[in-house]
Amino acid sequence: MRAALWPEEDAGALAAEAARWLHAGADGVFLAEVDGQPAGMAEASLRHGHVNGTATSPVGFLEAWYVAPPWRGRGIGRALVQAVEAWTRVRGCTELASDARLDNTAGRAAHLACGFAEAERVVFFRRRVG
């Protein structure tokens, strides 16, 4: 599911990162299943310091969120967000943040449908030096 979420990334690197997430224990990893088959996943962390659009620290952060296409629109994404929200609340946070690329209209709509409010838009710039 991570490879489907980030198809431009190296599958081996994504698998290694997933293994670190699972073994670290501090972050939240959530899997939704339907009839024993994976239907969706979410990964969450606690972010400290400045998190765009938030007023507190730490905040829960929805790092990854994916629902397989056959299961979209059936409440699985919402259930995953609710699980992440509960995980965040238990850790003493009062805010849950996330992000989506500007061109990811489906992801932005899913966030809004799950109760997120757009906090700000940022364009990142870079310039080579040397």
Image (cartoon, rainbow, N blue to C red):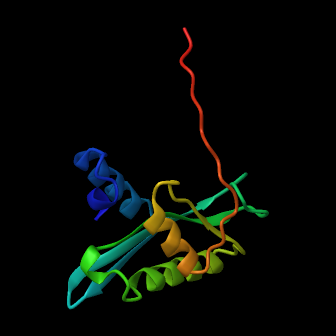
Q: Residue furthest right?
A: 55
Residue 17 pos. (x, y %): 35, 52
Residue 86 in sight:
yes
Residue 87 showing in the rendered view? no
Residue under the point 44% across and 59% down: 24
Looking at the picture, tell me which residue is in the foreground, 79 or 83: 79
Residue 128 placement (x, y as % from top left): 53, 18
* 42 on left or right of 122: left
Is residue 6 toward the left or the right of residue 124 in the image?
A: left
Judged from this view, the residue extending furthest toward the top is: 130
Tell me where residue 66 appears, x and y as whole percent.
Answer: 37, 69
At a point 32% along the width and 57% down the height, the residue shown is 19
- Residue 67, percent across and down? 34, 74
Q: Residue furthest bottom?
A: 35
In the image: residue 34, left or right of residue 119: left
- Quarter of the rendering occupied by the N terminus: bottom left
Residue shown at 28%/84% (left/top)?
Answer: 33
Measured along the vertical axis of the image, is residue 86 above or below residue 130? Answer: below
The quadrant of the picture occupied by the C terminus is top right
In the rendered image, the vertical position of residue 47 relative to residue 130, given as above or below: below
The image quadrant of residue 47 is bottom right
